[in-house]
Amino acid sequence: MGDPKAFLHIPRQEAGDRPVYERITDFSPVEQTLNRHDRMLQASRCMDCGVPFCHWACPLGNKCPEFQDALYKGRWREAYEVLKETNDFPEFTGRICPALCEKSCVLKLSADEAVTIRENEAAITEVAFREGYAQAQSYERNGKKVAVVGAGPAGLSVATRLNAMGYTVTLFDSKPHPGGLLRYGIPNFKLDKAVIDRRMAVLRDEGIQFKMNTPIDVNALPEGFDAYAICTGTPQARDLPIPGRELKGIHFALDMLDQQNRLLDGEAFPKEQLVNAKGKRVLVIGGGDTGSDCIGTSIRHGAKSVTQIEIMPMPPESYNPATPWPQWPQVLKTTTSHEEGCVRRWSLTSNQFIGKEGNVCGVEVEEVTWSQPTDGGRPQMKPTGKKEVIEADMVLLAMGFLKPDQPKFPENVFVTGDAARGASLVVWALADGRRTAREIDRYLRR
């Protein structure tokens, strides 16, 4: 450990974001970067705790103290080598992970100034690509073949690990380009797609075969493989089947997000198919990250106004005794998209969509209260009778995704990622992929 007292005199410094007035005019990344000197100083704040809760909280088991120490000492390549031992895609998690590690950092507990682990991770990876040591490796083949269905985070993780073990891996996906949610669900202002393309070039050079634009029926898997990994995610969004659902102007969140990413990738859509918020009063139903992404995208389209409603009550702003450290804190999350201009409301359920000439023009909502059963069961919702209409020309449904039902597969078929656990974080999908790769390896070595 280079400086055991750095955390006492060096405050947490984030790279910060581009000014709101500038960033809402484009889809370029919002987050900025620190220079190398300041980044190394931030790494020096790590106390190398006797019990590293950051390591405990990370689904991938990243060795945060080790790569912080190497970074502080200016050994950037060593920091990258430590990082990639546990994480094959640190450039993704370094940008979009909610940083479970930071929420369990001892400095988060003691001073509410956790080490900037996520930003440090991204910086280490950028230097690795810029200086040329994040490059393809060669692996000796073992003669066995594995098919991976789905080129999202879990599929990429399975494929990368198995490829490194010597298996010949073929990735199948129905989309034109790999990445899954990373490419088609997350806006460019959070994850520039050049970052994905850069890594995919490395994977191709390492021997992974990509079969894009190739839909696969999991009930009729392609022949010729020794094992299969099903990594198809959670494609079915949760709907809101209330009166008026058939009105025009009501869309699933990914209808907008997917289309916008494809437009930026050069695809074209007929005018009548565009999901564009320009000049519209937008209502986003759902308070999670997907809803936040809809807010940022609508603002960049030029929406007249954006409102976000959530059926659950507003969480505490700073500390929630129900989720004490080092647990993930269930507190109010304000994203960069919220900062760009949005009305947020909680404890509202939607009763019906209201239309005019076949188009949505509002949503009747009702205030609800929540009670916690004394027997430890699920919280119970109770309508209050207080109703109102929120005017809206476009409604975006961002209420999560349904866990898919999987058929009974043969023993050489493994289901992983969101396809197995339901909708979750990208970092969990990556961790699941690594675990499944080990399971497939054990199976094929029997």
Image (tube, rainbow, N blue to C red):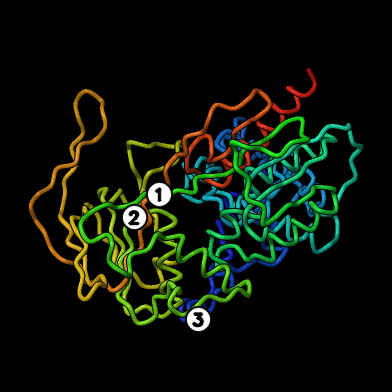
> Crowdedness of circle 2 by 10 Å Cα count: few (<14), some, many (20+)?
many
Badge 3 is on which residue?
Answer: 25
Going by the numbered disc 1, the residue's amino acid type is: Gly
**Outermost residue to the top:** 446
Going by the numbered disc 3, the residue's amino acid type is: Thr
Considering only vertical position in the picture, is 272 above or below 252? below
Residue 271 in picture, x, y percent from top left: 46, 80
Going by the numbered disc 2, the residue's amino acid type is: Gly
**Which disc number belongs to residue 400?**
1
> Crowdedness of circle 1 by 10 Å Cα count: few (<14), some, many (20+)?
many
Side (left or right) of 317 relative to 139: left
Dividing the picture into quadrants, the one containing residue 293 is: bottom left
Side (left or right) of 311 relative to 165: left
| Marks 2 and 1 in Cβ contact (< 8 Å) | yes
**Residue at the location (27% across, 48% down)?**
312
Mark 2 or 3 closer to N-term?
3
Side (left or right) of 139 relative to 333: right
Badge 2 is on which residue?
Answer: 286
Mark 3 or 1 closer to N-term?
3
| Marks 2 and 3 in Cβ contact (< 8 Å) | no
